[in-house]
Image (tube, grey):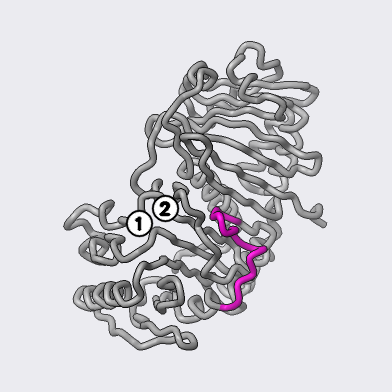
Amino acid sequence: MGTYRIACASQRSVARAFALAALLAGLALQTSCVRPLEAELPAGALLGGDAVALRSLLTRLERLEGTPLARRAQELATRLEGCDEFAGWARDGRLETLLDQLACGRLGSLPALEALRGVDDLAFVAPVGHGARLAGSATVAGDGSVALDARILGAALDGLAGFVLPSDEPAGVPVLSTARTLAHGRFRAANGLDIAALVPRGSQGDQLFRLKSELFAGAVLDGTWEAAVYLPEEARMMPELAVAFGFRARAAVVAAVESFLRDLQSVWPVHRTPFAVGDREGACLLDLRILPEFAPCYVAAERAIVVGFNPSSVRTALAAVAARDGAAADGGLVLNLGRFREADDRLRRTIAPNSPPVNLDYAWERLAARGYRHGDGYRIRVELRSGAPAS
């Protein structure tokens, strides 16, 4: 992070936020059957519906002042001024092509998209991954709040994507504190957490970080996992970050973690330092300095192994849980966008105190996304909640 430029911090943060939401939408779903309506959807990317609703959405995006997204939103709003309805179709599936194609007009020429819209404001189809498409509809409230429902058509989930595919069982109540979070997600992977299976033997990840160890093979884990990013403390260069992996048996998972630490010590010039939070014991690698403030630690908590970016991250993560700020017991992702500006400004004061304040408006207060089973497939629900107008 030595080349970190604070002038771009806000743009990168909002890009990460929206990219994370889009990634969850693309990964948390699958379907094994195609309804006739979906089979009739033309190839490529499509978007259409109520132009007034879209302009309300674009007005929110314009508040991301100084970003390419805001400039594109302003251009689209101008182009669609005076429209009652709009539609666009990009046969090549590219977002830029789709945005260029949006124009005033009814969805009559795209009956499958009109049927997909139903009584909602907008309908969309977008290619995601290899051979899959995201198809759904959305409503936009007068204040810019958005509710979106969608599914993925035409592709099964595997690899990392499968780690957010919801299991038959709920994800369970959070292990990590959700107070003061920028982001919090909790999931129960339908097919377990075999991270090692994704790592080629002899690859750099395997050689340097022993990612094919027993721990990452997932045999000692129960399939639940959770991650939280916290509002950075004053005078810190990085937000606090922690992940938790549910286990089947405490002794087995601790043995796997300790074996992993021994493997790391054989590759890196690091040393194991005992660490504990209350009666929850573990260890740190305080001299693994590959990132600013990076000194990873773990402890064995009641239901999970908790791993933090540094000792303070673990302590913060194991403070009292405040469930209203994070994902519920049925799992999902929450981004507390209303806190992002404060996070950027705290980092600015630490990293570049003489730079001007960060004034980027993140447009919405909160994003919540949740994948769930629907028939023999999976759907996702995404809600963007507007906050009070920026002053």
Mark 1, Cα crowd under 10 Å, few <14 / some 14-19 / many 20+, is many
**Residue drawn at point x = 58 percent, y = 17 percent:** 112
Mark 2, Cα crowd under 10 Å, few <14 / some 14-19 / many 20+, is many
> What numbered label is drawn on residue 193?
1
Range of residues picked out in magenta: 319-334
**Mark 2 falls on what kind of element?**
loop
**Residue drawn at point x = 39 percent, y = 29 percent:** 131
Q: Is residue 266 visible?
A: yes
Image coordinates for residue 20, horizontal then vertical, percent: 52, 50
- Is residue 356 rendered magenta in the image? no
- Is residue 328 rendered magenta in the image? yes
State if disc 1 and disc 2 touch (CB < 8 Å).
yes
**Residue drawn at point x = 52 percent, y = 61 percent:** 172
Picture quadrant where residue 155 is located: top left
**Residue named by callout 2:** 189
Picture quadrant where residue 53 is located: top right
Gap in Å between the C-alphas at discs 2 and 1? 7 Å
**Mark 1 falls on what kind of element?**
loop
User: Vertically, is 358 above or below 374?
Assistant: below
Of the 4 image quadrants, the one containing the C terminus is bottom right
Q: Main secondary structure of the magenta part?
A: loop
Image coordinates for residue 72, horizontal then vertical, percent: 64, 36
Please name the amino acid that badge 2 sits on.
Ala
Picture quadrant where residue 324 is located: bottom right
